[in-house]
Amino acid sequence: MEQINLIDVTLLLAAAQGMFLTIYLLHRHRRPLPNRFLIVLNFSYSVILIEMMLEELNFWDPFPWLIPVVLGIVFVMVPAHYYYALHLTRPGRKLQWRDLLHLLPFVLLELFQGVGMLRGQDPTEELFVPSHGGITVFNLILMGYALVYMILTLVRLERHRAASLAFLSNIERIQFRWLNNLTWLTIIILISFSLENLLLLRGIQLSDEFNLTSLLVALFVYALGYQILLHPDILVVPRAETLGANEQAISAEGPIDVLREDAPKYQKSGLSDERADAIRTALLQVMEQDEAFRNPDLTLIDLADRLEVSPHNLSEVINTRLGVHFFDYVNRYRIEQVKRDILDPGKQHLKMLAIAFEAGFRSKSSFNLLFKKHVGMTPSEYRKQNS
């Protein structure tokens, strides 16, 4: 075995952090179902780090048949990543027996390798022979399998974000940007590993002993630990009732585009023009006179209860009569209020963030993004232009 260097120490510390967080989550936060997938994900990455560190030390040279056994955990890791996102965005979903089918590749690989080992053979040896494309079949399968799950995760998060615009006025709580970023980091890891493998088999060494990929995996574990330890709110799964009125809001198929002319969502609602106009008038009064938009937690359900109408009918009025999603409708009022407050001489002493929060915004980043989108300039530029 080679002597331990700085990279080995980095991988060892990351693996130790991953194992520590796994134990911590098992002890303190194992009950919500999404957290259980987070535990599996965290543990899997720690095992991969240990494998990479041992490979760095040439530990596997006498035991090459063990590599598929250890790397097989990727076939557990990537479904856990996807199911973590799935159950975060659909907290009311129950596990089903068919979900276990996602573990079938892992089980088959371990059985295949285990039976071969008992016979004194390495049944996956041929999978590690470079193919005509310059990459081993095993790694090709592994990377393709993982990439499919990462794409599914990104699609699930985007559908959830898009569907949330129909019933939430602030989506920071359920947008899961950190998980989106970690998913992209995983894709970068997959690309890095494939590239290093391809170049190495062609005689080009991008980094010694796959150090680039190893450090990226360590970065993932450090980033995940950062989120868990410094932002523990990610361990508190949003209650299902705060995420939408019913399964029409978020479903397995994703949101329905209610702004399309051919959208079938409201064709059989039975809402008359007279009733729609009455709801619209009442809605304008609540928003303009009562300033309901100032509530940062305002949802479609809250507003419907206040107007004593069904969330479905209120959504129909906002989408078809006003031509916007609930999210845009409410935040336009907030932006107009911010513009008025910026020009108010009695509020010149207030910081921009204080004005934004008073108008109903929840975060600085969301406020700045929406303000520039609707006004065409940043809040600071607007204040300077009108000072």
Image (cartoon, rainbow, N blue to C red):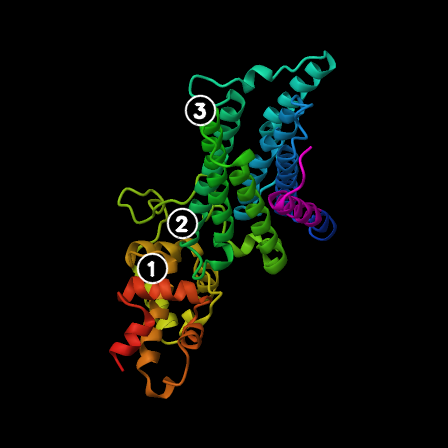
Residue 126 image offset from top left, x and y in percent: 56, 15
Q: Which mark is residue 156?
A: none
- Is the magenta region chiefly helix, strand or loop? helix
Quadrant of the drawing holding the N terminus:
top right
Q: Is residue 384 above or below residue 325?
A: below
Q: Is residue 286 magenta?
A: no
Give the SS element for disc 2. Answer: helix
Amino acid at pointer 1: Arg
Q: Can you identify the residue that label 3 sits on?
A: 202
Q: Name the residue that disc number 2 marks.
A: 162
- Of residue 336 and residue 184, the one placed in the foreground of this image is 184
Query: Which amino acid, by three-letter code, is at mark 3?
Result: Arg
376 relative to 244 in the view: left or right? left
Measured in 3D between alpha carbons, the distance from the residue under mark 2 to the one under mark 3, in whole angstroms, is: 44 Å
Pointer 1 residue: 275
Query: Residue at 37% across / 66% down in the picture?
Result: 368
Magenta range is: 1-22
Membership of 15 in magenta stretch: yes
Q: Residues within 10 Å of mark 1 (few under 14, many from 20)?
A: few
Q: Nearer the viewer, mark 1 or mark 2?
A: 2
